[in-house]
Every structure is written in C-alpha cells, then in structure tokens.
Amino acid sequence: MIHIGLTGGIGAGKTSIAKVLEHMGYPVFYSDSEAKKLYQTHAGLKEKMRALIGENVYENGVFQTAYLAQRLFAEPDLKNQVSGFVHPLVREAFQQWASQQPTSMVFNEAAILFETGTYQQFAATILVVAPEELRIQRVVKRDFLTPKEIRDRIAQQWTDDQKKVLTPYVIENDGRPLLYQIEEILDRIQNSL
C-alpha cells in the first residue's frame, strides 16, 4: 500500500483537496481531527497535557482547543513539547487506520509534515499552496480570526518555498482547476514508484 502525505499552510486548502481525493475513492486520514480526538480521549495524553499546560486545558472535562492554540503560539518551546506527546500517537493511529484500508493508496492530511520531518515516512508528499491574501480570506471566513492573528500563525510555519524544495508535487489552489492538477500529480507519483 502506498502512503501519501498531503500538506499545506493554514488556509492553503489541503482539506479541500482531501475531499476531492475522497470523492475519487481514496481514503484520507485527517491528522488534526485525530489529534483533537486523542486530546479528549487518550488518558495518558490528557495526564501529560494537564501536567504541562495546567488544568485550564480541560474545562469541565472538555479539551480547550482555543486555549491550547493561544498558549502554543505564545510559547514556541511549549509547542515542541506538546508535539512530542501527540505526534507519535497520531502516527500510530494513522498506521493502524492505513492497515485497514482496502485501497492501494491512502492519504494522510496534516499541517506540518515537513516541519516535523514526518514527510520522510511517505512514498510522496503533495504540497497545497495558495497566495497569502487568499489564505487569509479563507481563514477569516472559516475560523473568525483576525488577519493579524492569521499572519502571526503563517509566520510560525515554514514558507511554501521552504516546503517546495522537499517535494515536486505541488497543487496551486488559487482558482485553477483542481481535479486536473490532482490527477496529473497522482499519475506522476504512480509512475515514479
């Protein structure tokens, strides 16, 4: 089975590409959704999060995503520690999920595959890119953040140029037809393996 990474910066549209892949019949694992589930359900992770972040990370037993995001963007060292807790659990969940899929190719949608080095665990990684202003517009509508908050988050991620060095598979999600780009990249990946 071929494992393909799917990544892109905030607002680039990787989830939109993932939905197209699903409509094409490919299974997609959503790492961010899995992480949120683990924060809420994994006893060991909950214990580590409380010890590191404090009781405020769980209010009335409910994981506080916004509170964690605020702390992580304010304290970069904290971000690395939390990543060290949750990323191995997400990787394990992906491996288990992938082993149960009936297709020859599966996708893992995740925001920071390059930054964490996780892209090396895939046969190929597809990068979704879009102009910054378009990304900001998308995230303002989706998450109700201010443009400044979004720019701050973008500034903490690798640039598209840094990521492009690590993969030849790039989808330009700037209004160009997506299906053609996706099909062309899938053909290139299959021909290269």
Image (spheres, rainbow, N blue to C red):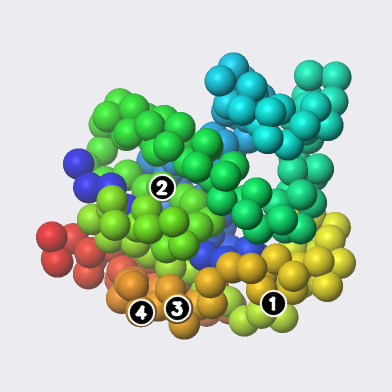
Nearer-N-terminus badge (1/2): 2
| Amino acid type of the residue tagged 1 in the rendering | Leu
The residue to which callout 3 is attached is 162
Number of disc labels: 4
* Mark 4 neighbour class, 10 Å CA radius: few under 14, some 14 to 19, many 20 or more: few
Tag 3 and tag 4, C-beta contact below 8 Å: yes
Q: What amino acid does circle 4 point to?
A: Val
Is residue 158 found left or right of 108 in the rendered image? right
Closer to the eye: label 1 or 3: 3
Residue displayed at 22% across by 64% down: 189
Based on the displayed image, in which of its 4 quarters is residue 104 positioned? top left
**Residue 191 on image: x %, y %:** 14, 66
| CB atoms of marks 1 and 2 within 8 Å | no
- Nearer the observer, 106 or 148: 148
Q: Which of marks 2 and 4 is nearer the N terminus?
A: 2
Q: Dot 3: few (<14), some (14–19), or many (≥20) neighbours within 10 Å?
A: few
The residue identified by callout 2 is 108
Residue that mark 1 sits on: 134
Residue plotted at (45% across, 32% down): 89
Residue at point 59% right, 68% down?
A: 157
Left or right of 140, for residue 155 = left
Nearer the observer: mark 4 or 1; the answer is 4
Q: Position of residue 13 (x, y in %)?
A: 58, 63
